[in-house]
Image (spheres, grey):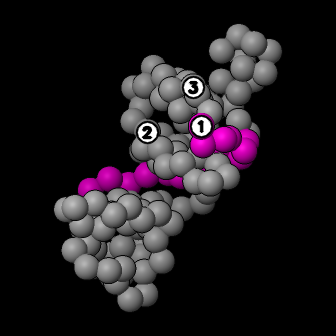
């Protein structure tokens, strides 16, 4: 999986209109209730955007096919077993995981362990 940590603190927020000026989200999701933005905490604060979840961002550097079966489930099972939430976003090339900021290092350790076990067939 080759998990890597992106530096920074990221937050989820929502806006009714378009992306506010000066804001560069890492992720956007269009929903009937509004536009969800995932962006750096300092950018959200500078734009006056409200949030309540601060996350660390991990990237699985393995190229995973969008129709692959089981990767997200294995990651979720590993992190859930440690009592950790995980919000997954699938990009075209990689999966992106947003975990509680204070648990980011532990999540990275867990995923590195899962990756090692999977490499030897003991997942």
Nearest to the eye among marks 2 and 1: give it: 1
Name the residue tied to disc 1. 67
Horizontal and vertical percent position of residue 61: 71, 46
Against 89, is 106 above or below?
above
| Observer able to see residue 76 | yes
Q: Which residues are magenta?
A: 51-67
| Observer able to see residue 40 | no
Nearest to the eye among marks 2 and 3: give it: 3
For residue 119: magenta? no
Nearest to the eye among marks 1 and 3: give it: 1
CA–CA distance in space, label 2 to label 1: 20 Å
Categorize mark 2 by other alpha carbons within 10 Å: few (<14), some (14-19), many (20+): some
Categorize mark 1 by other alpha carbons within 10 Å: few (<14), some (14-19), many (20+): few
Question: Which residue occupies the foreground of this view, 9 or 92?
Answer: 92
Horizontal and vertical percent position of residue 84: 42, 32
Horizontal and vertical percent position of residue 5: 63, 50
Where is residue 115, by image quadrant? top right
**Given the current orientation, which residue lies at the most extreme top position?**
122
CA–CA distance in space, label 1 to label 3: 10 Å
Secondary structure state at the residue bearing disc 1: loop
Name the residue tied to disc 2. 86
């Amino acid at each position: 999986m080759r998990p890597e940590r992106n530096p920074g603190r990221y937050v989820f927020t929502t806006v009714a209109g378009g992306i506010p000026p000066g804001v560069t989200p890492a992720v956007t999701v269009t929903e009937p209730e509004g536009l969800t933005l995932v962006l750096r905490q300092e950018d959200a604060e500078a734009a006056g955007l409200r949030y309540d979840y601060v996350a660390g961002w991990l990237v699985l550097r393995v190229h995973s096919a969008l129709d692959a079966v089981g990767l997200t489930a294995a990651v979720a099972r590993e992190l859930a077993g440690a009592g950790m939430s995980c919000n997954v976003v699938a990009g075209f090339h990689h999966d992106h995981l947003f975990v509680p900021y204070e648990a980011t290092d532990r999540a990275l350790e867990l995923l590195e362990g899962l990756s090692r076990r999977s490499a030897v067939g003991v997942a």
